[in-house]
Amino acid sequence: MYGASVTVQGNRDHGIVYAECPAGTAPTGGGGVTSGYDIFFTDSYASGNAWYIRGTNTGSRSQSLTAFALCQ
């Protein structure tokens, strides 16, 4: 399951995204994807029925951040 993407502005801006599992399931793992190489993940964790990713954009241009969850 993929969550919604967010735009993370450049110059050390932070973003947080999540991907929810369907009702009756829980995340057994997860991660994230970015539109570039300047976003570094600072957190990646499960909470409730979702997987969360937090990232910092160290570049100068805006980039997107998206979380995904492996649900079971």
Image (cartoon, grey):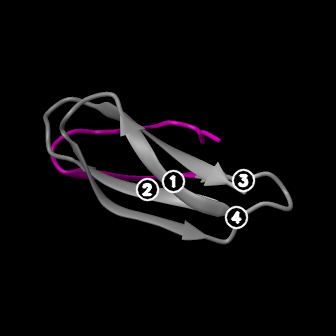
Q: Earlier in the sequence, mark 3 or mark 4?
A: 3
Please tell me which residue lies in front, 29 or 61: 29
Crowd around label 1: few <14 · some 14–19 · many ≥20 (10 Å): many
Q: Please check the rendered image and state whether residue 71 is part of the magenta-colored stretch, yes or no.
A: no
Range of residues picked out in magenta: 1-18
Mark 4 touching mark 2, by CB under 8 A?
no
The quadrant where residue 48 appears: bottom right
Which percent across, then down, holds residue 72?
72, 57
Picture disc at residue 49: 4
Residue at the (51%, 36%) spot, across then down:
5
Vertical side of 68 occupied by 36: above or below: above
Crowd around label 3: few <14 · some 14–19 · many ≥20 (10 Å): many
Q: Please check the rendered image and state whether residue 15 is part of the magenta-colored stretch, yes or no.
A: yes
Crowd around label 2: few <14 · some 14–19 · many ≥20 (10 Å): many
Q: Earlier in the sequence, mark 1 or mark 2?
A: 1
Query: Dot 3: what SS?
Result: loop
Crowd around label 4: few <14 · some 14–19 · many ≥20 (10 Å): some
Q: Amino acid at mark 1?
A: Gly
Q: Amino acid at mark 3?
A: Cys
Q: Amino acid at mark 4?
A: Asn
Mark 1 touching mark 4, by CB under 8 A?
no
Residue at the (18%, 50%) spot, across then down:
12
Q: Earlier in the sequence, mark 3 or mark 2?
A: 3
Query: Dot 4: what SS?
Result: loop
Residue at the (38%, 57%) spot, across then down:
54
Which percent across, then down, holds residue 24?
86, 62
Q: Nearer the viewer, mark 1 or mark 2?
A: 1
Picture disc at residue 53: 2
Picture disc at residue 30: 1
Q: Amino acid at mark 2?
A: Ile
Q: Earlier in the sequence, mark 1 or mark 4?
A: 1
